[in-house]
Amino acid sequence: MVKREEFLTSLLGQEGCKALKKATDHNPDLALSVIVRSLMGWLDVITRQDFQGKIPGTHYACEIKKNQSDTFSGHLKTKEDVVSFNNASLHNVAGAIATVLGVEDELPQNVDNTHLAALGKSIDLLIKARIVTSYKQKPVVPQKLSKSINLPRPSTRRVFRIAKASLTKSCSFCQEHFFKNDQFVGCHCFSGLSGCNLLNKSTEPVLSFNRSWDQEAITTLLEALKV
Ligand SMILES: [Zn+2]
């Protein structure tokens, strides 16, 4: 149980985790599905390239290489055991990690899928936001990962138009607004994405990013602001 919680906290941050707990407290089946969904969200980001690091929230080493046939090979190393996999599907890899995290229960069948789908979208976004902005804060994922998905940064400012309705959007985890006093500040969960400028707010709002922003972080922020 502890491992699952540390895994979630490492992936989603204290605030994101607290909010998620509130949303799933009344429903243990949903809480279990959320862990699996978070694991898939994390795997989705890290398996874009070969990964070598720790399973979030644990000291367990993990190596995953993507094969040409869209299968995966690698291993997990716990204190007691080494679990190897060869030409495994992403679901098999997730299963191996879930077991190591102590998520062995049968996955619940009666989960409200609409609720899980809505939560799942926010979970994916938050995981991505925390990974792509980890260079700005204390790393929550192995350094190697954040380096591997940082693209080269262009030298000029870039601007992107956003919908006016985005200015009043709030976080689906903590319900805090993303914009305060006409500045994007992010909520507690997405605060790593703060630091861009809002221009032309009353006519055609645009966000302006300086060169410290990489493309992944910009895309994630724009996705979070989509209405
Ligand atoms: Zn939030």
Image: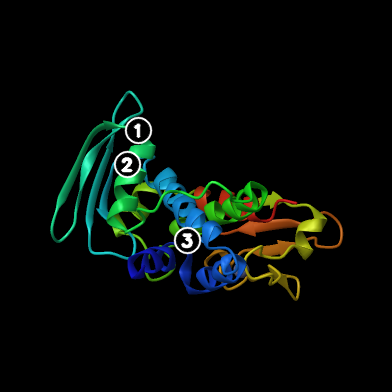
In the rendered image, the vertical position of residue 222 relative to residue 188, given as above or below: above
* Marks 3/2: CA–CA distance: 22 Å
Task: Give residue 189's position: percent from left, percent from top.
Answer: 56, 69
* Neighbour tally class for label 1: few under 14, some 14-19, many 20 plus, Cα within 10 Å: some
Q: Which residue is mark 1?
A: 89
* 3 and 1 marks in contact (CB < 8 Å): no
Residue 93 has which mark? 2
Task: Give residue 182's position: percent from left, percent from top.
Answer: 75, 71
Q: Residue at x 49, y 50 (%)?
A: 37
**Foreground pick, 207 / 179:** 179
Q: Of the residues shown, which amino acid type is indicated by label 1? A: Ser
* 3 and 2 marks in contact (CB < 8 Å): no
Decide which of tag 3 and tag 1 comes sooner along the chain.
1
Q: Residue at x 46, y 56 (%)?
A: 132
Query: Secondary structure under badge 1?
Result: loop
Query: Secondary structure under badge 3?
Result: helix
168 left or right of 114 in image:
right
Q: Which residue is mark 3?
A: 130
Please say whether residue 16 is visible from this viewpoint: yes
Name, please, the residue furthest toward the bottom: 181
* Marks 3/1: CA–CA distance: 25 Å
Query: Secondary structure under badge 2?
Result: helix
Dot in front, 3 or 1: 1
Quarter location, residue 197: bottom right
**Ligand 1 quarter of the rendering:** bottom right
Q: Of the residues shown, which amino acid type is indicated by label 2? A: Val
